[in-house]
Amino acid sequence: MTTRTILISGASIAGPALAYWLHRYGFQPTIVERAPALRDGGYAVDFRGQAHLTVLRRMGILPAVERARTGTGSTWYVNSAGKPQAELPADLFAGDVEILRGDLSRILYDATKQNTEYVFGDSITSLTEDADGVHVTFERSAPRRFDLLVGADGLHSNTRRLAFGPEDRYVRHLGVYCAIFTTANHLGLDHTGHAYRTGGKLVAMYSARGNTEARATFYFGSPLLDLDRRDAARQQDILAEQFTGNGWESDRLLGEMWHAPDFYFDSVGQVAMDSWTRGRVALLGDAAYCPSSLSGMGTGLAVVGAYVLAGELAAAGGDHRATFARYEEEMREYAAGCRKMGDGVAKLMIPQSRFVAGFLNRYYRLLPYLPGKNLAANMARRTAENITLRDYRQLTGR
Ligand SMILES: Cc1cc2nc3c(=O)[nH]c(=O)nc-3n(C[C@H](O)[C@H](O)[C@H](O)COP(=O)(O)OP(=O)(O)OC[C@H]3O[C@@H](n4cnc5c(N)ncnc54)[C@H](O)[C@@H]3O)c2cc1C
């Protein structure tokens, strides 16, 4: 085998999923994560269709994921008085299994921690490649050499910047910003979400952790802002400017925002790259092919990508050149389909014009009575299933 040691940057979903498979095939994974510890809680993500579920089943974690599912049912569009107007079926928003991102990350961490070296609170600062491997320097740890490096460090990937160039070459802003934070479930929502939409703005709340708390989410249309991603105070000011007096629960939720323990704010973007691999470096998950946080596809895509990348490495006997070519071939069309989905959802969920928002609100009210009522959910399912998974498991000898 030409490859043994693999450094993965990022310990959220794609990174630990890759480490799981790498260990099963006899490779030695190390994960470096910028956060000081595993990030718990967070927003809900989902899996839908056979490809996603098959990978979770083959990893042996499907039962744990199902036990931790949110159980969220339909989401409702409400009017300014909070009266439900139109139902969006669970299938559309929550897929087959919905789980908090942090809970999923914890399950993947537990499944890998015995056999993966985790380094928290650190980040790669430079990489130099030669014929034998990648020489990596870190913010805190001593420099090391690995056979391969995989960037699983998300939409704003550090690895992508270091190996492929600046973010603006690859990340396309979808014209929308998103904020999310934990709040009290003061509406008493029972495994459901309520969303209030006006032109270019959407504010929503959904229950979490068995209704004991809720998540407030805000979306607003905007060109890319010149912002420091770590400047939460400035981001909160912007959100307050956008939503004060917006109606429904906006003002109350903004009031809670100032002391939220986990305020998250980011632009909604997609990643499009001609190639996800260069030399001994590969990108995975959102770092490579983020379809946008609105697509409902990113998490499934990340675990499928990890499954394919590790499987192809085992099938190629550790030859990274053959592996990377096969990885691109297997994943390219699948990832492109998910990206297309993300594009469509952004336009439909947060239409910029008040007229279109009003039209869509009325349309959703009629949707249950129309023949195409399951169109969007079926389209999402078809997109999520548009890959034939090879079965690499015999390569493990188990
Ligand atoms: C608000 C919101 C809602 C979403 N809803 C859904 C949904 O409903 N369904 C769905 O499927 N997906 C959803 N997603 C998308 C989903 O979260 C991602 O697609 C998925 O988490 C991708 O996993 P990843 O591991 O590739 O990247 P990420 O989850 O982004 O993880 C990247 C990791 O890399 C770490 N990192 C970053 N920089 C560095 C560095 N320099 N060094 C080391 N580590 C670093 C980060 O701390 C993080 O742990 C949503 C996303 C957001 C933001």
Image (cartoon, grey):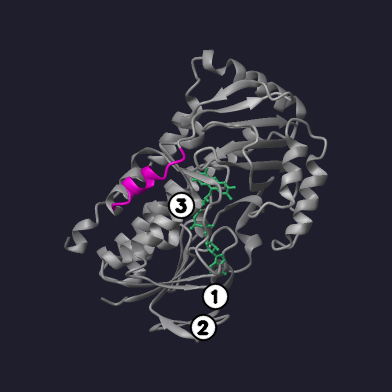
Where, quadrant-wise, is the N terminus in this rendering?
A: bottom left
Q: Earlier in the sequence, mark 2 or mark 3?
A: 3
Q: Tell me if label 1 and label 2 are in contact, CB under 8 Å.
A: yes
Q: Is residue 225 visible?
A: no
Q: State the residue in front, 63 or 355.
A: 63
Q: Amino acid at mark 3?
A: Asp
Q: State the residue in front, 82 or 139.
A: 82
Label 1: few (<14), some (14–19) or many (≥20) C-alpha neighbours in 10 Å: some
Q: Earlier in the sequence, mark 1 or mark 2?
A: 1
- Residue 103's label in the rendered image is 3
Indicate whether residue 95 is drawn in magenta.
no
Measured as percent of width and height from the top left, residue 218 is found at 68, 42
Q: Amino acid at mark 1?
A: Asp
- Residue 141's label in the rendered image is 2
Q: Tell me if label 2 and label 3 are in contact, CB under 8 Å.
A: no
Which element carries disc 3, helix, strand or loop?
A: helix
Name the residue at 37% across, 43% down.
66
Q: State the residue in front, 259 or 132.
A: 259
| Disc 1: residue Cβ within 8 A of ligand 1's nearest atom | yes
Measured as percent of width and height from the top left, residue 198 is found at 74, 30
Marks 1/2: CA distance?
A: 7 Å
Q: Amino acid at mark 2?
A: Ser
Indicate whether residue 69 is drawn in magenta.
yes
Magenta segment = 60-70
